[in-house]
Amino acid sequence: MGKIWLGIAFLVIAGCGKGASKHSSNSDDGTNSCNPEFESSFFNCNSLVSIDSLDDPNDDYIYRDSYSDPSFPSHRNADQYRTPVRFLDLFEIAPNTRVAPNFVLSEFISLRKGRYGIISPVLIDKLQAIRDQIQAPIKVNSGYRSPGYNARTPGSAKWSRHMYGDAVDMWSPAISLGEMQEQCLDQESSFTLLYETHIHCDWRNDFLSFLFFDNPPNGPSWDLSSELPLAYLKTTSSEVQINETVQLVGQIEPALEEGRIVTLWEVETEDGSWTEFESHEIQIHWETPGLYRVRGLVGGTLPAEIQIRVR
């Protein structure tokens, strides 16, 4: 990954900064270096458009200012949510352009969602590594979203990482969603979330690419981390009668992405042992009075616990 970042940083500093029209070069023998077999060649060989030059009649590419917007979560790193200043122009790049040996551009950035987009080289590098590891196709449900498109997506997070090019919703026909989540964690994903139909993985704590982002206003920082969202278990009642059914569902605050989040449940039984479930929600009852604990990993990663009193 260091090789990728050094190459990108050099190219931007050396003459592909804001307003530059092309990231490409030729080798000494006159052959074009834009070879799809070469690492990061896609990012070195395609046009970028300054944010000031976007044709954006619907204001779909107006980002909230993470430094001043009161809705920005205080526990997150504002530098990692700064506005991108350069974009790929999909009018200039064929959708089937290869971005990695097993992926093409349209899997991550779709013209039907907007003319412009960004995509993290780290994301591409990690997904290709997962593809190499599982030796099977990866199906991408969602990649980049413009702020406008994200706002029109039901249930999407206001500060979704999809707007910053380092998030993906995906699944594979060859492995379970839980196994796919483990693959993301093996690739040092900053945050994962297990849904009924897919896995959300993002690399929000990695350096933002200098291709698309300028330095933070106070200069580069090595502290990129943000606290994870808070999870809790919502119940119809925390106090019930014997044999009365209680319903529980795992939730996240603030709400993240669209879809039904899966929780890995552990329910304390009358004899003090634990029963495990994996589902969006559960309905349970106890036949003996007592105080019982219910634990959950919401989205497969975020711990939460609640106590239910049975009378």
Image: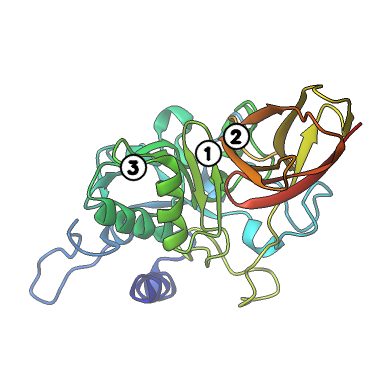
| Front-most of residues 301 and 11 | 301
Looking at the rendered structure, the kind of residue marked 1 is: Arg
Q: Which residue is mark 3?
A: 175
Residue drawn where x is 65% and y is 76% of the image: 219
Is residue 194 visible from the viewing direction of this image? yes
Q: Position of residue 88 (x, y in %)?
A: 41, 47
Looking at the rendered structure, the kind of residue marked 2 is: Asn
* SS of the residue under disc 2: helix
Residue drawn where x is 27% and y is 51% of the image: 134
Label placed on residue 134: none
Label 2, label 3: how far apart the Cα atoms are: 28 Å
- Residue at the extreme top of the image, as rendered: 244
Is residue 215 depicted above or below 256 in this figure? below
Looking at the rendered structure, the kind of residue marked 3 is: Ile
Q: Position of residue 138 (x, y in %)?
A: 32, 42
From the viewer's perspective, tell me whether residue 27 is left or right of residue 93. left
| Front-most of residues 45 and 19 | 45
